[in-house]
């Protein structure tokens, strides 16, 4: 076997192309969102867009380095990397600095690193390894214990850092558990139904829902009075649902803290707190909404300039895109993300190694969750949870972490014939 | 257990479910965006009525009072017309330019330059609009989206005095902004004088308010309940050490003359009066008339912008004998009882210095009293030719160190802006001119009578008078006595600076200066009822008439004021500078001047033309 000097052989060009499109759009958007009148150069390193350029360039270098690593390294070192990142998560609790109430940053000179961003990657590696190793083909809820531990540990540590947004991202791994057969489909449907009921409970008085469900039950009970066994089962379902509705309502009213409550309340009616929690959402919708069909044009946005929403270039970056590039531009961006996600899933499906497949699905799940929550919150479909839009939002940790994540998978895919 | 076939079929179904979810999410987003961006027009209306305007609250600059609490500098409100180019919409331009009295081209040009500065930040469109324009604009502001009126303040001076000391305020330049990020384009900064030295104290802190305005440019509320607003902090008031009445009187006496008066309170170093003549009205260098007036003053051949009190480099002439005698006494070149007779000139090695006729013989006291050049030259030579120094260089360096300890040849580094050090000849200087072996005591003998390689500023001469008044030390002369509260004395200048001369020798000079006024060269300037010590000087001026110089302090036993006066091209020190000093001292110590004829003579004198 001749030594392989061509590290880029079999690299999926479409994925790399999509990646380059997204980081470029990100850089331009950060520039448009944060342009300083006195430092107009896109390469002014005192400004966030200048720094973003550096982050992107270094990320690409990192990506290339990853392509040169022996593919066997990733499964072999997955636990070590995972353990290391857990250690970092513990260390940041003691030695980290607090930004926006979250103690989740390491400051090394001028560079700020958020270990939680990298924990997603290491968790994916560990999850891929443990599912790859599980001997039994049979997948049941019992087999869930080990994967759950792997997901749960970093989640716990990130919660302790008071970084709820990042911790929630780990919920994305539910998708991979479903894909690998750990979770039956009905559970997923149940979950969606639960979310639907949840929203309904918040929208309406819980007694109306309970009353309506009870009425439906009574009508069906009369219709099915000759089949008492089914009626009995229906009755149990009714009790369960009503309890859930009540618990949701109670949790919302009594347990959630006021600021968390407001984040949900403003989704339904942003005017409840137009100067506070509803403010960001309201401004965000105005910015995007005023973009119209074709947008106001590059740097012509009026709402995203000096609007003093602190997350202008980070979590609310989609506002700038919506305002300046309009419906068409937003649709193109969404299209790019959908293409990337589906491409990753299709690549994952063609893997011979379970490790690579699981890892690919992990990548797709995490990217999808960020995409769903970030864009969803800017257009008022999801509560405001501060997580970045991958490859687009300003921030070194985010860019680096997603780049490492993506390029590891590209590498695994390019050597799919060597890994079993 | 599932068969592999069943298993892969299941997997494929799950894959499709996941892809379906992803596409569904994308579709929901696109539909939602379609409603937000294309169908629903409310957001475009919201956007046009959701204009944030960043307003800067400019704090009032600190006021400046005199030592008795009289107001010297205050602020007067005015208005700038501002524009945010990104918010300018269709409007009746004709009406607008008529209101402002500008042409259409000017309108376009200003808008263009504002746009090139920033589309989203406010620029000044018209500075200092008149009250009439302001009233007319205020009513119609809603017709001109993107324009608004910004209240500002300008410096105002109730008394047109002490312009150089106050200095002036102007707009920051790019260098200021680069140096200190606090400043933004359009801010004011102290450029000279007290305004410059105490800039950080006087300026206070700007506040920022973000308000929301509707499409008609009306404020509809604060942004996020003022979460990002910062409160403006007014500047701190300063209490200048100047005495308003004395300063005014000094400027009056110096009218139609060129020169300077510096009066210092010896016990504190506080400057009571700092007169530079000719001066100018500080109200000339304010606001938009500033640059025009500045150019005018700059082109004035009388150089009114030149701060003579701190920057003019005069040879001190005979006034400097006080300092030389002190060095001679300290170094043992003479003693208090050393006597010489004066033949009316000093001559040695081909050099002759003339003297006048006066009683004989002379010692350190009478030598000063009659300003004897012969005694001065002999004592200077005796002092620096002492064998203990080993070399001329050592001797002159010792002499110079003593002189520097009295505040000459260096700046005080106090709150006086643009102060210059003057010049005291050094061994290095003479080595450069004559070569290391090319000079001796006689070469530099002119130093004995305060001429030659020697330049002193009026404030240094006043400080010499204060040092003698204190019998050997001085407080750094300064113009701001307290910051904030009148009792919180400026801590910068509370340490006495000791000279290298023993106080016993100062007592000798106090007596000599007292005799100078009682029965010496300054006897015509005696003030009835007040003991005064002084020294006259007539500075040889190769370019024209001699300069008249005088230093003094009074009362002799409890000095309240020390003074230096220089009148350029006026002639002898006893004729002009000494009478002016005596009037200033009388005014300060008694509050009024009784010698009207004496005063009248000074007021009528005019020395501007005979350069
Ligand atoms: Zn003589």
Image: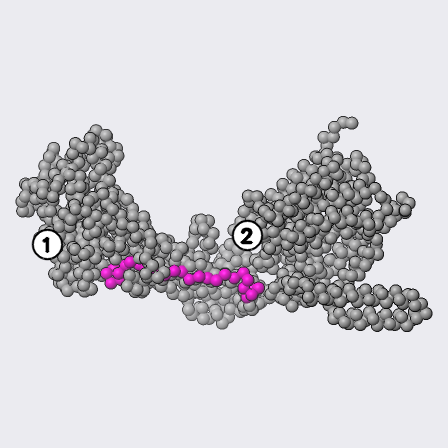
Q: Position of residue A149 (x, y in %)?
A: 74, 48
Residue that appears at 46% across and 49% down: B178
Identify the residue at the far top of this view: A2
Q: Are marks 2 and 1 on the same chain?
A: no
Residue that appears at 71% across and 37% down: A67
Residue that appears at 54% across and 64% down: B226
Q: Which residue is mark 1?
A: B518
Q: How is colour applied across the structure in the image?
A: one colour
Which quadrant of the structure image shows residue B228? Answer: bottom right
Find the magenta span and give its range.
B222-247
Q: Which mark is residue A36?
A: 2
Please say if B84 is above or below A17: below
State yes or no: residue B226 in magenta: yes
Residue that appears at 89% across and 44% down: B4
Q: Position of residue B84 (x, y in %)?
A: 53, 60
Q: Nearer the viewer, residue A273 or B286?
A: A273
> Does dot 1 land on a helix, a strand or a loop?
helix
Label 1, residues with CA under 10 Å away: few <14, some 14-19, many ≥20: many
Q: Are marks 2 and 1 in contact (CB under 8 Å)?
A: no
Q: Which mark is residue B112?
A: none
Q: Chain of mark 1?
A: B
From the image, state whether disc 2 or disc 1 is nearer to you: 1
Please say if A257 is above or below A25: below
Please say if B67 is above or below A158: below
Left or right: residue A399 compared with residue B319: right
Label 2, residues with CA under 10 Å away: few <14, some 14-19, many ≥20: some
Q: Position of residue A74 (x, y in %)?
A: 73, 38
Left or right: residue B213 compared with residue A88: left
> Does dot 2 land on a helix, a strand or a loop?
loop
State yes or no: residue A36 in magenta: no
């Amino acid at each position: 076997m001749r030594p392989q000097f061509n590290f880029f052989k079999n690299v999926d060009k479409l994925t790399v192309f999509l990646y380059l499109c997204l980081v470029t759009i990100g850089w331009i958007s950060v520039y448009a969102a944060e342009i300083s009148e006195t430092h107009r150069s896109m390469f002014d390193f005192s400004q966030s867009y200048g720094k973003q350029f550096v982050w992107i360039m270094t990320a690409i270098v990192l990506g290339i380095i990853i392509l040169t690593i022996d593919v066997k390294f990733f499964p072999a070192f997955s636990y070590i990397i995972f353990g290391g990142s857990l250690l970092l998560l513990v260390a940041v609790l003691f030695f980290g600095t607090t930004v926006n109430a979250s103690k989740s940053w390491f400051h090394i000179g001028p560079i700020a690193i958020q270990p939680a961003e990298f924990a997603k990657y290491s968790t994916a590696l560990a999850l891929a390894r443990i599912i790859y190793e599980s001997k039994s083909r049979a997948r049941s809820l019992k087999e869930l214990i080990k994967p759950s531990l792997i997901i749960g540990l970093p989640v716990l540590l990130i919660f302790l850092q008071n970084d709820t947004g990042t911790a929630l991202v780990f919920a994305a791994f539910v998708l991979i558990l479903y894909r690998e057969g750990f979770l039956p489909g009905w559970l997923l449907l149940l979950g969606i139904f639960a979310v639907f009921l949840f929203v309904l409970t918040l929208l309406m008085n819980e007694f109306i829902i309970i009353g309506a469900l009870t009425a439906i039950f009574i009508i069906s009970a009369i219709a099915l009075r000759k089949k008492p066994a089914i009626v009995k089962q229906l009755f149990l379902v009714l009790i369960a649902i009503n309890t859930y509705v009540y618990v949701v309502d109670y949790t919302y009213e009594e347990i959630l803290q006021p600021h968390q409550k407001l984040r949900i309340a403003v989704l339904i009616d942003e005017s409840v707190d137009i100067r506070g929690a509803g403010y960001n959402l309201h401004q965000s919708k105005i910015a995007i909404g005023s973009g119209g069909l074709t947008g106001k044009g590059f740097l012509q946005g009026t709402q995203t300039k000096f609007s003093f929403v602190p997350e202008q270039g980070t979590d609310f970056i989609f506002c700038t895109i919506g305002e300046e590039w309009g419906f068409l531009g937003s649709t193109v961006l969404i299209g790019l993300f959908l293409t990337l996600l589906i491409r990753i899933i299709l690549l994952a499906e063609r893997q011979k190694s379970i490790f690579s497949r699981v890892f690919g699905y992990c990548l797709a799940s995490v990217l999808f969750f960020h995409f769903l929550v970030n864009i969803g919150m800017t257009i008022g479909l999801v509560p405001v949870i501060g997580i970045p839009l991958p490859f687009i939002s300003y921030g070194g940790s985010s860019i680096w972490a997603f780049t490492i994540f993506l390029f590891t998978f590209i590498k695994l895919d390019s050597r799919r014939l060597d890994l079993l | 257990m599932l068969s592999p076939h069943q298993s892969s079929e299941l997997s494929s179904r799950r894959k499709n479910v996941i892809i379906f979810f992803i596409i569904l999410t994308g579709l929901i987003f696109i539909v939602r965006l379609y409603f937000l961006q294309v169908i629903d027009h409310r957001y475009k209306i919201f956007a046009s009525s959701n204009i944030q305007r960043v307003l800067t609250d400019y704090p009032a600059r600190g006021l400046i009072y005199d030592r008795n609490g009289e107001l010297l500098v205050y602020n007067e409100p005015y208005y700038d017309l501002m524009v945010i180019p990104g918010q300018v919409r269709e409007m009746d331009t004709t009406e607008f330019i008529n209101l402002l009295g500008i042409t259409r081209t000017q309108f376009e040009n200003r808008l263009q330059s504002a746009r090139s500065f920033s589309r989203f930040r406010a620029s000044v469109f018209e500075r200092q609009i008149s009250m009439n324009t302001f009233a007319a604009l205020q009513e119609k502001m809603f017709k001109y989206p993107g324009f608004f009126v910004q209240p500002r303040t300008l410096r105002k001076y109730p008394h047109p005095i002490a312009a150089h000391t106050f200095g002036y305020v102007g707009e920051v330049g790019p260098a200021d902004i680069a140096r200190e990020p606090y400043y933004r384009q359009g801010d004011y900064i102290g450029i000279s004088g007290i305004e410059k030295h105490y800039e950080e104290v006087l300026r206070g802190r700007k506040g920022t308010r973000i308000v929301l305005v509707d499409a008609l440019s009306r404020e509809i509320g604060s942004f996020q309940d003022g979460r990002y607003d910062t409160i403006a902090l007014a500047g701190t008031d300063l209490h200048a050490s100047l005495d308003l009445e004395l300063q005014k009187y000094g400027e009056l006496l110096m009218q139609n003359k060129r020169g300077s008066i510096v009066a210092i309170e010896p016990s504190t170093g506080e400057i009571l009066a700092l007169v530079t003549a000719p001066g100018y009205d500080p109200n000339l260098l304010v606001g938009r008339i500033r640059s025009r007036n500045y150019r005018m003053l700059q082109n004035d051949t009388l150089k009114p912008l030149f701060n003579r009190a701190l920057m003019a480099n005069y040879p001190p002439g005979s006034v400097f004998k006080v300092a030389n005698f002190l060095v001679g006494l300290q170094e043992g070149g003479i003693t208090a009882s050393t006597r010489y007779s004066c033949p009316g000139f000093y001559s040695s090695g081909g050099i002759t210095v003339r003297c006048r006729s006066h009683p004989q013989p002379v010692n350190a006291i009478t030598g000063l009293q009659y300003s004897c050049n012969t005694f001065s030259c002999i004592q200077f030579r005796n002092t620096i030719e002492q064998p203990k120094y080993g070399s001329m260089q050592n001797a002159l360096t010792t002499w110079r160190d003593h002189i520097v300890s009295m505040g000459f040849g260096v700046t005080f580094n106090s709150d006086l802006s643009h102060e210059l050090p003057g010049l005291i000849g050094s061994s290095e200087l003479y080595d450069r001119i004559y070569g290391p072996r090319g000079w001796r005591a006689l070469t530099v003998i002119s130093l004995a009578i305060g001429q030659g390689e020697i330049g002193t500023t009026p404030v240094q001469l006043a400080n010499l008078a204060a040092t003698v008044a204190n019998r050997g030390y001085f407080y750094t002369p300064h113009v701001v006595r307290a910051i904030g509260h009148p009792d919180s004395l400026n801590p910068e200048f509370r340490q006495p600076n000791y000279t290298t001369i023993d106080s016993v020798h100062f007592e000798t000079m106090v007596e000599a200066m007292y005799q100078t006024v009682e029965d010496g060269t300054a006897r015509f300037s005696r003030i009835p009822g007040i003991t005064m010590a002084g020294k006259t000087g007539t500075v040889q001026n190769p370019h024209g008439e001699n300069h008249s110089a005088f230093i003094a302090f009074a009362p002799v036993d409890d000095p309240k004021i020390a003074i230096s006066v220089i009148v350029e091209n006026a002639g002898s020190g006893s004729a002009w500078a000494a009478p002016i000093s005596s009037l200033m001292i009388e005014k300060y110590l008694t509050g009024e001047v009784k010698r009207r004829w004496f005063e009248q003579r000074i007021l009528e004198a005019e020395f501007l033309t005979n350069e």
